[in-house]
Image (cartoon, helix red, strand yellow):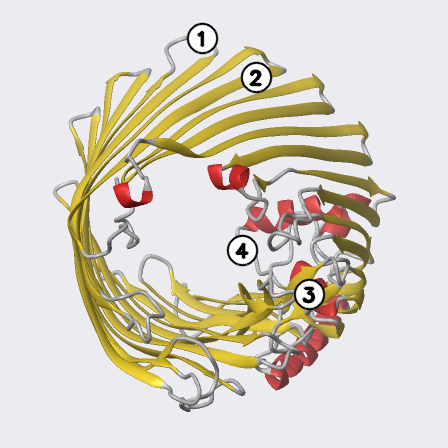
Amino acid sequence: MNVSREKVIKNGKGRKMALSVRGVLFPRICESVCILLALMGVSAMAEDTNGPPMSAQDFFEGGTNTYNNWVEFSAGGFLPSGNRAQAQAVQNWNSGGFGGIQDLHLQDNVTLFTNTTVTLDGHSIYDQHNYDVNLRLEHPEKWFMQVHANNFRTWSDGIGGFYPPTGMQYYGPKGSTPLALDQGEYSFLGGVTPDGLPSITFGYTHSYRYGNENSTIWGPTHPNPPSATVQGLAGSLYNIDERVDAFDLNAKKTLWDTDLAAGLHYEHGDLNDGLATTFYPGEPAEYDRTITDKNTYNLFSATATGEKWIKQHVFVSAGGMVANLDNHFSGSQIYGNGFGVPYIPGMGAGLGYYNMIGDSHLQEYVMDLNVLTLPISTLAVIPGLRAEKESWNGNSTGTGTLPTFPSPSEQPFSGQSSRDVVDVCESLDVRYTGFTNWVLSAGSQWEESDGNLNQFGGLSQIDGIGVPPVTNYVNDTSLLQKYSAGASWYPLRQLAFDFGGYYKYDSYNYSASADSTPDGDTYPGYFTVQDFRTSDGNCRVTLHVLQSLSLISRYEYQLSFIDTTPSPDPALGISGTGMQTSRMHSHVIGQNISWIPWSRLSLEAGFSYVLSTTRTPASEATAAILNAENNYWTLNFSPSLVLDDKTDLNVGYFYYQANDYQNNSTAGVPLGAGSREQAVTATLTRRINARLRVSLKYGYYDYKDALTGGNSDFHANLVMATMQLRF
């Protein structure tokens, strides 16, 4: 149970930051820091005195004068077998060896400034591409400066679809190689609090994302060559390169017992993304498609808020925001022999485009008002109001292509769209504690909107292929309602009940004043009304059978419907009568047990079971579309044993299983989760003395997936040793 002991000690001093990312941005600097801190720790351990004599347990925890600084080194390896890419994606560990600083905290007073503290927190482990460094210099209630940098990497598997009749597994453009996506930021934050003047903070953040990520937008294949059936099974991947620079300026001041705040935000983004897909891989007709999507935007927003107690039982808060977004975009969809190739007439066989450019503009205004009233000591009533107006417009031009051989065709296109919408939301929440051992709560929310969407033009139709340019003007209104209620009852000190539920009804109405498509095939022209209804009920029981044994039981039921009224079209036999287009019901069952049978042993276990099914008329009409099944169960078990005053042992077990896979490969693409995952971990921690502790962790992970015919299965072993020095 050393983990809980550490939390008590570190959180008690309020100086530890949660740092969970690993990586290496500055490997040389990190290595130097490791050597320096190791020398500091060894030197500090030469005199291992910490005040008056202590008990054995207090001694190994540092006593009452807990050390404020520490460095924790780690080294180990993650060794998967089977699908390495899937192992890295699920466990978020890079395969192979690693080592570095697991956790670092340094804090001291700066001699050059009075009452000034410098704090350094960090984390950097080599070959995991994850790091976090935070340096803060602070004079309480006067000023502060903070510099922060972090990076973390996630992996995904470039696997595509699996075709059971032939046992063929398809992959994306990079095959079975793990796809890596890095995300991170560099930031500076500073603030001053001058006497008698508003406190001011200024911040700058540069954030980024770059790398590759798997996509489920799969390309077409002939999975059974003698057959002409085409199924989307060929994998694809996103190429991501995004950078955003943001500046913030905020001010706070209390005037006339009113807390006032104002802020300015400016953001510039440069997003360069793409999608790479191979069509008919391994076949004579194989070719590649590259979609590029480039966006450069400038966003400016201003906010203002105010809070004030009016009399003794009324608290009012209000705020407003105005935002302006300008965006310039460009892109292309090109087919050819390879990715990123220029458009060549006659190459490939798909409808594409190039030289697409456009601009869009968005303006948004938001106002928010909330009032807390306490008419009596046991009753709180909170009404709220939020109003929002949004206006945007966009336009684009480009050249559509149908690069068939020997007579390729090209056609210029243009498109314009605009939208205006006003949205008003009212809310009311009530909480009552006037009954002994009861807490009652209720809430309601109403939201009304009125807007219009105008669309003109679009991509070209070439040689009768593609969607022709459209003219579509739609007026839309919506009414969203939600009503909720809850109660907590404490009949005994050892027993508590929690009940709750809500009903939500959303209704959207569309009226097309102009629609050039004969059958209303432009969204939302193909229906006039769409309603969403959801009912939810849940309960929880907490029982403390003994002082050392507690049980928490949970159950939730949810039922949802989608009702759609299509636009009438006599030519297609559509009468415009409403129909139920979706029905989803879910059961969620959970049980947690916590037991401490012995002062040195604690046991925790949890179980959850989810039954969720979505049915549609389409799934009843054809085997190509299946009901959406989301049924699974999980189990976890975590015993902790204190072997002696120096040694702790923590063990964990996790199990997950879903059996929703359905093989309908003869009619469509097989889908549905059919996976099993389990993990076993064990951590042994040994406290050498008050300044030094070491630990050894082992983990075994097992994953199986029926959806990919076993091609995503893996086993993995994790071994990691850590050493912590306090000083």
The amino acid type, in three-letter code, at marker 1 is Thr
Q: Which residue is mark 4?
A: 15
The amino acid type, in three-letter code, at marker 2 is Ala
* Number of residues whose C-alpha sits closer than 10 Å to that of mark 4, classed few (under 14), some (14–19) or many (20 or more): some
Give the residue at x 30% y 71%: 461
Q: Which residue is mark 3?
A: 224
* Cβ atoms at labels 3 and 1 below 8 Å apart: no
Residue 249, image quadrant: bottom left
Disc number placed over residue 496 in the picture, else none: 2
**Distance between mark 2 and mark 3 Cα atoms:** 60 Å
* Cβ atoms at labels 4 and 2 below 8 Å apart: no
- Of helix, strand and loop, which one carries label 1? loop
Image depth: mark 3 or mark 1 in front:
3
Image depth: mark 2 or mark 3 in front:
3
The amino acid type, in three-letter code, at marker 3 is Asn
Q: Which residue is mark 1?
A: 436
Which mark sits nearer the N-terminus, 1 or 2? 1
Q: Position of residue 497 (x, y in %)?
A: 55, 17
